[in-house]
Image: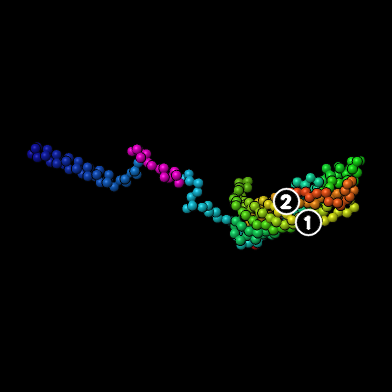
């Protein structure tokens, strides 16, 4: 009887060992096959790295959902500002700009401005000198501008305001053409002139609702100004042309933008 028990126990041990080996084999067969490695211990990711560092991936592009859209909408803004680089004059500029955007990135605009300029302190000081009493440097004063432009909007972003509100804004670049109006300064009576003008506007739009935004414009206009003598000074007489002068007017404007 004792031998039979020992044999039975041996069979049980052998059966349990066989069952254990079977379960281990099944578990190994179900485990995922590890990826191919280079050198036996590192995964080859060189292909992934080359795609990551590629200068451009034509399969992807940035997608930006816009809260306030300009596409197929008209915009109009009354504006107010000043010329910031006139060496002889100071004063205010006011006007209006209208835009139409056929896409978020491109549009057209028309601008009209009126300037109210007067002599600055440096120009007035010249007129106070005894040798030049009442004189003014030979120059022209900006009186107005009108023109058209092509809007390109490469930048759109969001920014936090005091951690309480998100403000959406665009930055636009606008090549322009138009006409600048100016007064030739002549003792006894000025003379109005106009000149073909080309320029580049840099505009920032800050959107607050679906119909309202604030805009800030930095307008750079380039033209030739015909300069004449202010008063009789040999060999010139007043009003006589002295030269054609290259002028750059840089104007800063703020406006309330309404779009519909």
Q: Where is residue 96 in the image (x, y as percent from the top left)?
A: 73, 58
- Residue 230 vs residue 25: left or right? right
Reply above or below: 250 against 71: above
Give the residue number, with chain letter if any, for mark 1.
Answer: 194
Count every numbered label the image shows and give the total: 2
Give the residue number, with chain letter if any, for mark 2.
Answer: 222
Asked if the magenta segment contains residue 253, the reply would be: no
Q: Write the start and end of the magenta stretch as one range.
A: 38-51
Identify the residue at horizontal 63%, vertical 47% (top origin).
Answer: 161
The local secondary structure at tag 1 comes to strand
Q: Quadrant of the N terminus?
A: top left
Q: How crowded is mark 1: few (under 14 residues within 10 Å), some or many (20 or more)?
A: some
Q: Position of residue 160 (x, y in %)?
A: 61, 47
User: Of callouts 2 and 1, which one flags the residue occurring earlier in the amino acid sequence?
Assistant: 1
Residue sitting nearer the eye, 131 or 20: 131
Q: Quadrant of the C terminus?
A: bottom right
Q: Where is residue 118 in the image (x, y as percent from the top left)?
A: 83, 49
Q: Position of residue 171 (x, y in %)?
A: 63, 51
Residue sitting nearer the eye, 41 or 6: 41
The local secondary structure at tag 2 comes to strand
Identify the residue at horizontal 34%, vertical 38% (top origin).
Answer: 39
Identify the residue at horizontal 65%, vertical 59% (top origin).
Answer: 108
């Amino acid at each position: 009887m004792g031998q039979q028990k020992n044999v039975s126990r041996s069979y049980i041990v052998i059966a349990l060992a066989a069952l254990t080996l079977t379960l281990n084999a099944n578990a190994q067969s179900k485990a995922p096959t590890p990826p191919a490695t280079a050198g036996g211990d590192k995964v080859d990711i060189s292909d992934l790295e080359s795609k990551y560092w590629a200068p451009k991936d034509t399969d992807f592009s940035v997608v930006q959902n816009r809260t306030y859209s300009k596409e197929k909408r008209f915009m109009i803004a009354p504006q107010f500002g000043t010329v910031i680089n006139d060496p002889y004059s100071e004063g205010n500029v006011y006007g209006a700009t209208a835009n139409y955007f056929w896409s978020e990135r491109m549009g057209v605009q028309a601008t009209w401005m009126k300037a109210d300029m007067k002599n600055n302190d440096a120009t007035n000081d010249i007129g106070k000198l005894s040798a030049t009493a009442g004189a003014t440097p030979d120059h022209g004063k900006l009186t107005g501008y009108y023109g058209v432009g092509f809007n390109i909007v490469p930048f759109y972003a969001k920014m936090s305001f005091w951690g309480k509100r998100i403000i959406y804004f665009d930055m636009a670049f606008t090549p322009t053409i138009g006409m600048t109006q100016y007064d030739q300064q002549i003792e006894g009576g000025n003379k109005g002139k106009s000149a073909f003008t080309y320029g580049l506007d840099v505009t920032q739009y800050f959107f607050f609702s679906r119909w309202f935004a604030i805009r800030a414009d930095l307008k750079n206009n380039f033209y030739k100004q015909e300069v004449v003598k202010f008063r009789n000074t040999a060999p010139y007489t007043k009003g006589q042309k002295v030269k054609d002068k290259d002028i750059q007017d840089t104007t800063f404007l703020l406006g309330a933008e309404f779009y519909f």
